[in-house]
Amino acid sequence: MSVITDLLSIVGAWITGVFGWITDAFEGVLEIFYDDGFTVLGTLLLLGLAMSLVFFALRYIRSLIAK
């Protein structure tokens, strides 16, 4: 049973480390776009996403009318 316990603790430590690394990376990238409010890059990102959604919707509607 000692081997299984050691194995589970090692696997648990790896999983915790990987999730910690992912959350640290996400928080680092998030600071580029949002820091006590949207930054200039964050505002441009939202504007780009909104325009992309509008163009996608217009293209979809145009394809429905063409049929």
Image: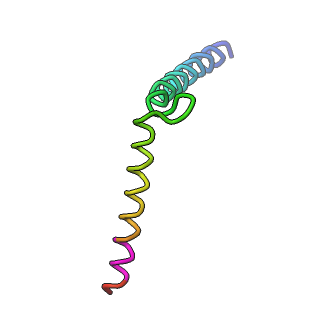
Task: Determine whether 56 is above or below 23 in the image.
Answer: below
The residue drawn where x is 55% and y is 34% is: 37
- Identify which residue, 29 or 25, lies in the foreground: 29
Residue 1: % across, % down: 69, 16
- The kind of secondary structure the magenta stretch mainly shows is helix
- What range of the chain is rendered magenta? 59-64
The residue drawn where x is 39% and y is 76% is: 61
Residue 32: % across, % down: 44, 29
In this image, 19 relative to 54: left or right?
A: right
Query: How is colour applied across the structure in the image?
Result: rainbow
Task: Determine whether 62 is above or below 38 in the image.
Answer: below
Residue found at the very far right of the displayed protein: 1
Asked whether residue 43 is drawn in magenta, I would say: no
Task: Determine whether 62 is above or below 39 in the image.
Answer: below
Asked whether residue 61 is drawn in magenta, I would say: yes
In this image, 63 relative to 20: left or right?
A: left
Task: Determine whether 41 is above or below 11 in the image.
Answer: below
In this image, 31 relative to 13: left or right?
A: left
Residue 10: % across, % down: 57, 16
Residue found at the very far bottom of the displayed protein: 67
**Which quarter of the figure is the C terminus placed in?**
bottom left
The residue drawn where x is 41% and y is 43% is: 45
- Identify which residue, 10 or 43, lies in the foreground: 43
Residue 8: % across, % down: 62, 21
- Identify which residue, 49 or 44, lies in the foreground: 44
Q: Quadrant of residue 3?
A: top right
Looking at the rendered structure, the number of numbered marks drawn on it comes to 0
